[in-house]
Amino acid sequence: MKILPLLPLSAIVNSTDARAPHADISNASHLMGDVSDDYGDVDALYGDASYGDASYGDVNTAALNTWDTLIGDAEEVGGPSLKRKLLIGGGVAAAGAGAYAIARAIKQKRAKAARVKNALAGSGHANTISNQIAARRLMGKVDRSAQFPFYQIIGATLNSFPLAPTEAFAADTLKYNMDRQSTDTPFEVEIANGIYSAPQFTCTAVGTAATRYYTGLFLTVGIAILNANPGTIFSVTGSFPTVNGGSLIISTNPFSFTLRASVYYAKFLMFPWQLVVNKPVLALGAYNSTPATNIVVNVAGLPASATVNLIVPGSLHPWTIAMRNRLI
């Protein structure tokens, strides 16, 4: 609502309403209705005839416009008290006298708000957990015909492999396997720490007596910076049981990786497969403890001080949930 400049007291007319004979627009606006209804068009009362060019000239007409803006800003900065002081004792002349102080206060307030906003934005970027949650929520959908590679590596370079990196499978197949895992054998996760026995680490996921299905596996490798040599080469072999009673065996032709300089940490994601007419097909993994049908991964080429972990994400693991939600 636009504030009328220098409203004269004579313009405040007592109400004739018998229910409130002493009410006026200053203390009972709810009884008065729309001000424009009682006093007509604002421009007709306070337009050119009273405050226009004839009395005050162009400069003061501009000052009145500035005054309206300052009154609103004064309420923003100092609240009703500052607004009231300007209305009662200021007049149009006070607009020019207090303009600099008000403008400075507004500028300081807005600068402080900007600093707080930037600080909050910075802290949000630094919050890794919040970023991960947001990223999972905002992941784009993957069409069922999209192609996924059988393995991916972060923090290292691929040297040799038992399966060409160009081989891939349809996203719809992964969706089916994840649905079976969720329906038939729900569990959260199993983490198998690598045990070093020269010259390799061995990770064994034993599962439970009841069979557990799995769709993908994570292998993490970390080396303390004081014990690592840039360009360390390590190899991965293993046995990965599948739902059809067989196992994917990787031995004579292992995965070979080179750790990237100054990283000393790598994460390897792999989906099990089986060969059908020499063509790899995504397979649903299945392992248990009785009889011993375990997932076994061997990692060679790392110092004894390194850390190796095998992560088997179940249907309740955050990665599985996020991946499944992406699949249409």
Image (spheres, rainbow, N blue to C red):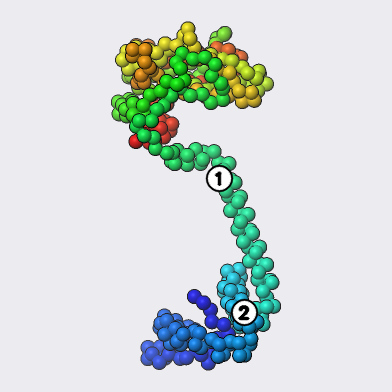
- Which residue occupies 37% across, 12% down? 278
Q: Nearer the viewer, residue 130 or 1?
A: 1
Determine whether, in the image, residue 9 is placed left or right of residue 105. left
SS under mark 1: helix
Quadrant of image for the C terminus = top left
Relative to residue 209, is residue 143 depicted above or below? below
Judging depth in this view, the residue of 141 and 27 nearest the camera is 141
* Residue occupying image coordinates x 67% and y 74%: 99
For numbered disc 2, what is the local secondary structure?
helix
**In the picture, residue 159 is in which quadrant?**
top right
- Mark 1 and mark 2: span between their CA atoms? 45 Å
Residue 66, horizontal then vertical, whole percent: 61, 76
Give coordinates of residue 87: x percent, y percent: 60, 81
Q: Position of residue 208 (x, y in %)?
A: 37, 19
* Residue at 68% over, 78% down: 96
Residue 213 location, quadrant: top left
Q: Position of residue 168 (x, y in %)?
A: 41, 23
235 relative to 90 in the view: left or right = left
**Count of numbered badges drawn on the protein:** 2
Q: Earlier in the sequence, mark 1 or mark 2?
A: 2
| Residues packed near mark 2 inside 10 Å, few (<14), some (14 to 19) or many (20 plus) | few
The residue under label 2 is: 62
Which mark is in front, 1 or 2? 2
Amino acid type assigned to the residue bearing label 2 in the image: Ala
Q: Which residue matches tag 1? A: 124
Contact (CB < 8 A) between labels 1 and 2? no
